[in-house]
Amino acid sequence: MSLAGLLSHSILNVNEVPMIMARAWKIAPGDNANNWDVFRVNRCIAIGWLPESDYRDFPDAAEALAALKEVHGPNAKGHGKGAAEMISAFVSSIDVGHIFVANNAYN
């Protein structure tokens, strides 16, 4: 059934409505948001845990974690498993049309 057809019914089953959802990412544009102007002017976003790396070279979070440990040392705050998982998710999932919420720190 088309969306118009679904909307014409007096009772709508939300499980039958096609979902069109934007993906949202929360990101800190550099320490103290120091890269915000660059990102805003260029209409782009970046992540910088490993600034000398191409994140596409990491096939999974485990490889990203190994690189983080090599560059920042083991147990470096903000550069552990969570960061590796975010790198992997960002590289594999980012797409045109996604929404970015920028803040100036972790929270």
Image (tube, helix red, strand yellow):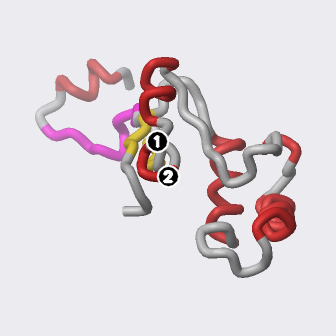
Left or right: residue 31 compared with residue 5: right
Left-right relation of 23 to 4: right
Q: Secondary structure at mark 2?
A: helix
Whether residue 54 is situated above or below residue 78 in the rendered picture? above
Relative to 22, residue 64 above or below: below
At x 36% / y 62%, what residue is drawn? 107
**Where is residue 36 drawn, in percent x and y?**
44, 35
Circle number at residue 72: none
From the viewer's side, name the closer residue of 90 and 54: 54
Q: Which residue is mark 2?
A: 31
Using the numbered discs, state the Cα–Cα distance from disc 1 to disc 2 in whole angstroms.
6 Å
Q: Quadrant of the N terminus?
A: top left
* 1 and 2 marks in contact (CB < 8 Å): yes
How many other residues sit within 10 Å of disc 1, few (<14), some (14-19) or many (≥20)?
few
Which stretch did the figure color magenta?
A: 11-20
Q: Position of residue 65 (x, y in %)?
A: 79, 66
Measured from the top left, where is residue 61 in percent x and y? 77, 61
Label disc, if present, on residue 34 of the rendered structure: 1
Residue 64 forms part of the magenta stretch:
no
Q: Residues within 10 Å of mark 2 (few under 14, many from 20)?
A: few
**Callout 1 amino acid:** Asn
Q: Quadrant of residue 62?
A: bottom right
